[in-house]
Image (cartoon, rainbow, N blue to C red):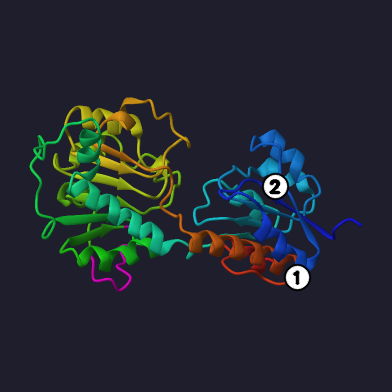
Amino acid sequence: MAARFRVLVTDRAWPDTSVEQQILAKIDAEVVEPASTSEADLIAAAANVDAIATNWAKVTAAVIRASGKCQIVARFGIGLDNIAVDAATDLQIPVTNCPDYCVSEVSDHALGLLLACNRRIGLYHERSKRGEYNATTSMPIQRLTGQTLGLLGLGKIAQTLVPKARAFGLKIIAHNQSGQDYGTGVRMVTFDELLSSSDYISVHAPLTAKTRHKFDEHAFRRMRPSAYLINTSRGGLIDHDALWAALHQNLLAGAALDVFDPEPPDLSQPLFQDERVIVTPHAAFVSEQAIHQLRVEAMQNIVEVLSGRRPNNVVNPQIYSDR
C-alpha cells in the first residue's frame, strides 16, 4: 500500500536515511531520493512529493514547482542560499532551517583555525611531514594575547565565539548590517575599520547578492600584511582569485578556509596548495550530536506541516499573515 506522503531528500552528508524514515513513519510518509543533484534529476524526483528536504543541493524555483503539491521546503542547515525562497513564498510554501544545530561546533572550528594560523600549525605540519624539522618561519610569530579578532557578522555562531576568543586574551571588534552587539559588549566598527584593525578576521555572514565577494581585491588591500582571513560561513563571500593574488603580493599572511565556491573545490589550484592556506572540507558543522540534531529538527518541521501545524524556524513567516 502506498504511503500517505512522499518526502524528497535531495542530498545528505550522512550514509543513510534511517533517522528520517523513522520520524516520517509516524505520519505514514516515505523518503524519495533523486538519481543525482542535477536540476533535471531533482525536478524528476520532485514530481508529486509533499515535502522537500535539502542539504546542499540547489532547490530552484523549477524544482519547487515540479511537485505540484509541495507543502514545505526544509533545509538541513542554517544558510538558505541554495533554496529559491522567493519562489516558495510566492507559492505560499514555508521554508524552514535549523539555526541552532551546530553553533558550538562551528565556533570551535573557527577558533581552532585561528589558533592554527597564529601558531603556524598547518605550515609546521606540512614542512615536518616533508622532513624539514625547523621552528623558524619567514614571518615571526606574535603572542596571541592582546591581538585583535574581527568578526564579519554577529549572529549566534559569532556570539558563541566571542567568550571563547576572549578566554585567549583576544580583543574583539565586529561589523554587521544592524550595528547591534546583541549584548556581547563587542565594539562595533565599520567594515573598513574591521579590515584595517584586525589581526584575524573570522567570517560569519550569510551569502546574499550584497555580500557575495565581500572580500575582494579592494578589501584585501585594506587588510594588515600580518593578518589572517578565516571563513567557516560560505565560500562565495570571498573572491578566491583575489585572495590568491593578495597572498602572492603578500597583502595578508594567510587564510584558513572551510567553505568554497564551488564545492568541492579544485584542490590542485595554487591557492589551496599554498602552505599559508589551511583547508578543511566544509567540516566545521560536523559532530555526531550536531548531525543527529539537524536531521531530527528538519524532519520534525516536515511532520508539523504535513500534520496541519505551523513548524519551527520558518524563514518566510509572511506566508502565514497572508492566509
Mark 1 burial class by Cα count in 10 Å: few <14, some 14-19, many 20+: few
Residue 183 place in picture, x, y as percent: 30, 74
Find residue 217 and report its horizontal and vertical position in percent: 27, 33
Q: Kindly report the secondary structure that dominates the magenta region of the rendered protein.
A: loop
Q: Which mark, by number, is residue 308?
A: 1
Left or right of 182? Residue 197 is left
From where the camera sits, is residue 238 visible? yes
Of callouts 2 and 1, the N-terminal one: 2
Task: Identify which residue is drawn at 21% across, 60% down.
Answer: 173
Q: Residues within 10 Å of mark 2 (few under 14, many from 20)?
A: many
Q: Residue at x 68, y 63 (%)?
A: 302
User: Count the marks: how many?
Assistant: 2
Q: Nearer the viewer, residue 234 or 16?
A: 16
Report the disc number at residue 10: none
Which amino acid is tagged 2? Ile
In the rendered image, residue 182 lying in the magenta stretch gets the answer yes
Q: 124 or 220: nearer the eye?
A: 124
Q: Is residue 312 left or right of residue 229?
A: right
Instruction: Work out whether 20 lies above or below 248.
Output: below
Image point (65%, 51%), residue name: 16
Element at label 2: helix
**Residue range (magenta):** 176-186
Coordinates of residue 24 in the picture (x, y in percent):
73, 63
Q: Is residue 153 visible?
A: no
Which residue is at the front of the view, 141 or 50? 141
Residue corresponding to mark 2: 64
Determine whether the residue tagged by mark 1 lies in a helix, strand or loop: loop
In space, the residues marked 2 and 1 are separated at their CA atoms by 19 Å
The kind of residue tagged 1 is Gly
